[in-house]
Image (spheres, rainbow, N blue to C red):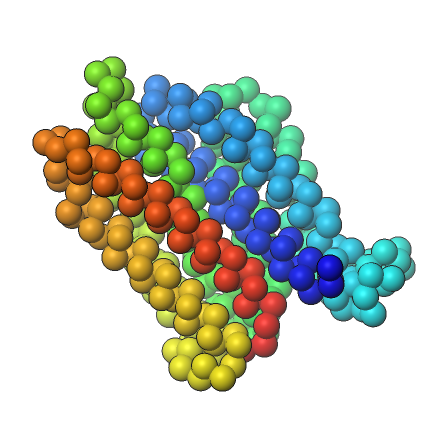
Amino acid sequence: MTPDTAFILCRFAFDGAALFLWGSAAYLWLLVPKGLSGCIWAKLGVVRFAAVALAVISTTALLPVRSATLGNGWADGLDTDTMISVLTGTSIGTAWAWQAMFAAVLLAVTWLPSHRQMAATAIVSALLLCGLALTGHAAMNDGWLRVLHRANDIVHVLSGGAWIGALAPVALVLCRLRDHTAGTDARMALIRFSTAGHVAVALVILSGLANSLLITGGLPLDWSVPYQRLLALKIGLAVLMVLMAVFNRYGLVPRIGRSRAAGNALAAGTIAEIVIAIGVVALVAWFGTLEP
């Protein structure tokens, strides 16, 4: 495996894990009634543990991988002096230090009592994601434009994570709609997600457009450039997710109390959104390593 391929895999594992932890924890903490949120949080226990493990492992691997991509291959990636130079002398090292610090805190959060884990996981995961703006395309500008680009990147990744990261617990909430005990709480949680989703989707679209302008100077229309081809594909998948979300909200949600088929279709649509979201994260992990 080449260092470049390893870097893309590390980015995919880290981004996917952190987005899931942020979105699911924030949704369950802030929008789901307490009794139901605790139940869903417990059901996600294995997935949460796997996500934390992925975030920690990918972060640990990222420093030698980046040293290898910046140097002359794996020999430099495993060289202590090269890793120290990257860590102390580059923005990549600063971003890695931020990521490593909050990955360690995220691991410590798993030892907290369960009633405190949700809030702590949401906050730490959000800070972990903010570190993504310290390097990459967000660091390509100077002065106030760099600050603006980084702020826009933070808005984009947090709003996107709040949307796609919450899809897994939403799927579990949907399973409770016909439960005599939890059905009312499940409907409330679903309505709150739909309302908050309007804000998250709007922020994703606006910040995504701003990002495209900041990086490429416009929409990705030059398909001879690999970066722009992959960005265009990512935008297409995001648009598909938005259309599915709109149909779910206005076509299926009003009917779930009257039709079992609508509830089943909503669950299937949510799972389809999760699959597409995984594709979006994979594309971002890939084209984020390319020149615009």
> Does the image show residue 15?
yes
Closer to the camera, 258 or 106? Answer: 258
Q: Which residue occupies 62% across, 24% down?
A: 111
Q: Which residue occupies 59% across, 49% down?
A: 13
> x%, y% of residue 41?
44, 26
| Corner quadrant of residue 50 | top right
- Is 3 situated left or right of 256 in this image? right
Q: Which residue occupies 47% across, 76% down?
A: 228
| Corner quadrant of residue 8 | bottom right
- Is 251 situated left or right of 115 in this image? left
> x%, y% of residue 125?
53, 42
Determine whether 190 is above or below 278 in the image. Answer: above
Closer to the camera, 60 or 114? Answer: 60
| Corner quadrant of residue 85 | bottom right
> Does the image show residue 214?
no
Q: Residue furthest left?
A: 258
Q: Residue furthest top?
A: 181
> x%, y% of residue 77?
82, 59
- Is 285 situated left or right of 25 in this image? right
> x%, y% of residue 65?
74, 58
Closer to the camera, 145 or 202? Answer: 202
Q: Which residue occupies 45% across, 24% down?
A: 43
Determine whether 127 is above or below 3 in the image. Answer: above
The tally of labels here is 0
- Viewport quadrant of the N terminus: bottom right
Determine whether 276 is above or below 260 in the image. Answer: below
- Viewport quadrant of the C terminus: bottom right
